[in-house]
C-alpha cells in the first residue's frame, strides 16, 4: 500500500512538472538577443514580444563574404503554438508545431518539410541556449548561443 501511495505521489509530481506549453509566457526565456561566434561566422538570433500571443524574431548569419537573414515568429493558435521561419531559399514561410515543452526543452516539428524536420531549443540557463536543427537520415547541426546586450555587441 505504501508503495502504491509513493508511486501515485511521484506520478502526480511528474505530471505537474511536465506540463505542455499552452501559452508563450512559458517560452519567454527566448526573449532577448543571442549570439554564437564560430570559426568562420557569427550567428545572431533575437526575439521580442509583440503580444501575449506572438513573439517576433530574426536570425542573421555573418561571414566575411555574405550575410543571411531569416524572419522568425512564435504564435499561439487554438491548435497550439507554432514556430514560423521565413528564409530566402523557401518560397513560403515554413511552420513547425510545438510538440513538446518539458522543463528546459521546447521541440518544434514539421515532418512534411524536407529539412529541417525538427528544431529544439534547450534552455541551459538564463544566459545560454542550444538550438538543435535536425532532419531525416541523421542530418543536422547544433548552435550554442550566449545572451548578449547592446554593450556586448559594440565590444566585439
Image: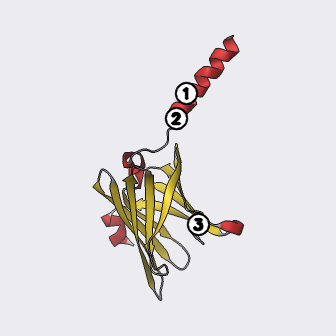
Q: Residue furthest left?
A: 51
Mark 1 vs mark 3, CA separation in Å: 35 Å
Quadrant the N terminus occupies: top right
Q: Residues within 10 Å of mark 3 (few under 14, many from 20)?
A: few
Q: Residue 69's x, y, as percent?
A: 42, 77
Q: Residue furthest bottom?
A: 65
Q: Secondary structure at mark 3?
A: loop
Which colour scheme appears in the figure? secondary structure
Q: Residue 134's x, y, as percent?
A: 61, 65
Q: Secondary structure at mark 1?
A: helix
* Residue drawn at (63%, 15%) of the image: 5
Does residue 10 appear in the picture of this structure? yes
Marker disc for residue 13:
1
Q: Which residue is mark 2?
A: 17
Q: Nearer the viewer, mark 3 or mark 2?
A: 3
Mark 1 vs mark 2, CA separation in Å: 6 Å
Of residues 108 and 39, which is closer to you in this image?
108
Q: Residue 125's x, y, as percent?
A: 48, 49
* Residue drawn at (42%, 66%) of the image: 45
Q: Which residue is mark 3?
A: 112
Using the image, determine if residue 65 lies above or below residue 128: below
Quick one: label 3 or label 2, which is nearer the N terminus? 2
Mark 3 vs mark 2, CA separation in Å: 30 Å
Q: Residue furthest front?
A: 79
Q: Are marks 1 and 2 in contact (CB under 8 Å)?
A: yes
* Residue drawn at (39%, 46%) of the image: 23
Quick one: label 1 or label 3, which is nearer the N terminus? 1
Marker disc for residue 136:
none
Using the image, determine if residue 49 lies above or below residue 102: below
Amino acid at each position: 500500500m505504501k508503495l502504491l501511495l509513493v508511486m501515485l505521489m511521484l506520478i502526480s509530481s511528474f505530471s505537474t512538472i511536465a506540463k505542455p506549453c499552452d501559452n508563450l509566457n512559458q517560452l519567454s526565456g527566448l526573449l532577448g538577443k543571442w549570439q554564437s561566434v564560430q570559426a568562420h561566422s557569427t550567428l545572431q538570433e533575437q526575439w521580442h514580444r509583440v503580444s501575449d500571443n506572438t513573439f517576433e524574431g530574426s536570425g542573421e548569419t555573418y561571414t566575411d563574404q555574405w550575410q543571411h537573414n531569416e524572419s522568425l515568429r512564435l504564435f499561439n493558435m487554438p491548435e497550439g503554438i507554432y514556430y514560423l521561419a521565413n528564409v530566402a531559399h523557401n518560397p513560403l514561410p515554413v511552420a513547425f508545431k510545438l510538440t513538446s515543452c518539458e522543463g528546459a526543452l521546447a521541440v518544434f516539428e514539421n515532418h512534411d518539410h524536407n529539412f529541417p524536420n525538427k528544431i529544439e531549443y534547450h534552455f541551459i540557463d538564463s544566459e545560454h541556449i542550444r538550438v538543435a536543427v535536425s532532419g531525416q537520415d541523421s542530418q543536422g547541426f547544433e548552435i550554442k548561443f550566449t545572451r548578449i546586450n547592446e554593450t556586448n555587441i559594440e565590444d566585439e
